[in-house]
Amino acid sequence: MQVTAGDKTFWVDWDVPVAMEDGVVLRADVYRPLEGRHPVVLTYGPYAKGLAFQEGYRRQWSQLEAEAPEALEGSTNAYQNWEAVDPEKWVPDSYACVRFDSRGAGRSEGYMDVWTSREFQDLYQCIEWAGGQSWSTGKVGLLGISYYAQNQWQVAALNPPHLAAMIPWEGACDWYREVFYHGGILSGFASSWYPRQVVSAQNGVGERGWRNPHTGEPVSGPETLSEEQLARKRSDLPSEIKEHPLNDSFHSDRTPDLSRITVPLLSSANWGGQGLHPRGNFEGFMGASSRKKWLDVHGDTHFTCFYNNYGLRMQKRFFDHFLKDEDNGWEDEPRVRLQVRHSDGRFVERHESEWPLDRTRWTPFHLDLAGLGFSANPPEEAQSRAYSAAGDGVTFSTAAMEAPLEVTGPVAAKLFISSSSVDADIFLVLQVFDPQGKEVVFQGSNDRNTPIGLGWLRASHRRLDHDRSRPWRPYHLHDRREPLNPGEIYVLDIEIWPTSIVVEPGYRLALNLRGRDYEYQGEVGEEMRSLGYKGCGPFVHNDPDDRPLDLFGGEVTIHSGPDTPSHILLPIIPAT
């Protein structure tokens, strides 16, 4: 049907049926110019393609309206959908926008089982279908946030012929290390996200769910099933995750071989996405075999830079070049674009050629347990300090900076610890404090009060994959549990996800070594308080089955000295 939105007129095909090879029918909405053949921007996911952003995600929409109004200008926003592109801003520029409900979600039939090889095969077939339509040029690009980014890594490794370019925007690519378990510690994200955002839009919710404001039809299918019937038509993801605490085939089958990716890509990360997304964008950029690949790293919420002019212009220039073959100078763009954070709240754009940066001075800051500071070398005599394994731990701090100090890149810690029990969970928080002693935090992808960096490791998961580990990014196998002998000293190599901060004069850099999730000590604000967000957003690690007090409620001792050189390895960027 032909529709008009403001001064724009285009064609919309609702609920187009597309049969998979096993006979299951998925459904897509297609937004396209009235005539001609056009490249395709495609998404495939479980959030219900017919659900209006403004209705399904009211809090985030209100935040976008209030804090990034430019993102909503130039559109009636009538066709906005969570974490997907706005057709009103793409179709007039001669793109077709295709939104698929994933198997078992929205208007698509089938058994809902997210992030599986079945879904990746479905997405492959959806790409090939879109590339073969009469209104398509045969070039398909993938673009979307989070879920719509994460499955890009998987399907790109399968190399569908019609996939011409991809923009994974804030999307993980390692299901064990980035989504389900952090350093071997169960993340609570899936248990809150799955029922709230996925099950609520399952095919068969029907009349109990939302309606498409344009067609009047239920966004989750015409059939209304009972809760018992719906449960039989979907996997119990949170329970399945808990049943697989080690990195077995449940996780590895979801995780792509990045080296198989050859398509041009623009990987866009968020410094403040600690707990889910940023690591995948860095790992994907480094691991993909694509000769033409770019990395963008920004701040702000999970969605602001995707919709605002900064993101939109970048996305279109990239796709105009690779989907339309326009000679627009994109090939001359810097391979790495960083919005470098400063401790006074500024972001300063800087262009680089690689990641990590070649000029990085990898500098060990050794822990001084006596003075709770750092030193250039290990203490001359052995030191030790104990803290409660269920508490806020101990904090090490630099003196106030006399000159700016830039830390940009992946961070690693080497710690020598002993425990009063047979295991210990180590939580690391990289922090900055202003001259008055107040912690500097930034708007994160979800939480308004995110620290500079986070890292985690369960001591029984300390075994390294030496082939894949680097001094600046330890890589753990997570394939077995090796209990500790209480009182015995063990060395732990701990990854802290990539970060960027320029610590200005008068400010201090600190490392908090603790036994539980970080909590911001300042005023979190009413919005964050209502959500239960205390600095980590929904990415918390407090499941009592995963962290029983008899194992993780004892005492941890940190050791530092000539034979136990505990330190943090910082990526110091010299001033230019």
Image (spheres, rainbow, N blue to C red):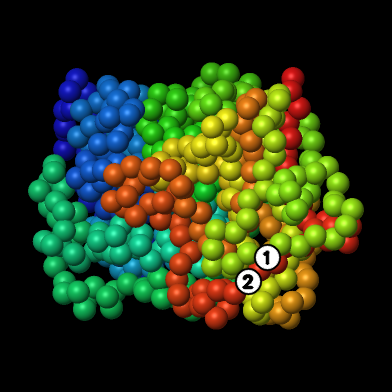
Mark 2 belongs to which amino acid? Glu
What is the quadrant of the C terminus in the image? top right
Q: Position of residue 240 (x, y in %)?
A: 44, 75
Q: Position of residue 539 (x, y in %)?
A: 45, 57
Real-space CA distance between mark 2 and mark 1, rounded to the nearest whole angstrom? 7 Å
Count of residue discs = 2
Numbered label attached to residue 386: 1
Is residue 417 visible in this depiction of the protein? yes
Q: Residue lying furthest front in this view? A: 370
Along the viewing direction, whichever of 411 and 321 lies nearer the viewer: 411
Q: Are marks 2 and 1 in contact (CB under 8 Å)?
A: yes
Q: Is residue 271 above or below residue 506?
A: below
Is residue 316 visible in this depiction of the protein? no
Q: Position of residue 555 (x, y in %)?
A: 63, 71
Mark 1 belongs to which amino acid? Ala
Along the viewing direction, whichever of 304 and 503 lies nearer the viewer: 503
Q: Secondary structure at mark 1?
A: strand
Q: Is residue 188 above or below residue 48?
A: below
Q: Provide the residue designation for mark 2.
A: 555
**Residue at horizontal 59%, vertical 67%?**
388
Q: Position of residue 244 (x, y in %)?
A: 52, 76
* Of pointers 2 and 1, the one earlier in the residue sequence: 1
What is the quadrant of the N terminus in the image? top left
**Residue at horizontal 29%, vertical 44%?**
526
Q: Is residue 473 left or right of residue 226?
A: right
**Residue at horizontal 48%, vertical 37%?**
442
Along the viewing direction, whichever of 24 and 188 lies nearer the viewer: 188
Badge 1: few (under 14), some or many (20 or more) residues near its Cα, within 10 Å? some
The picture quadrant where one finds residue 189 is bottom left
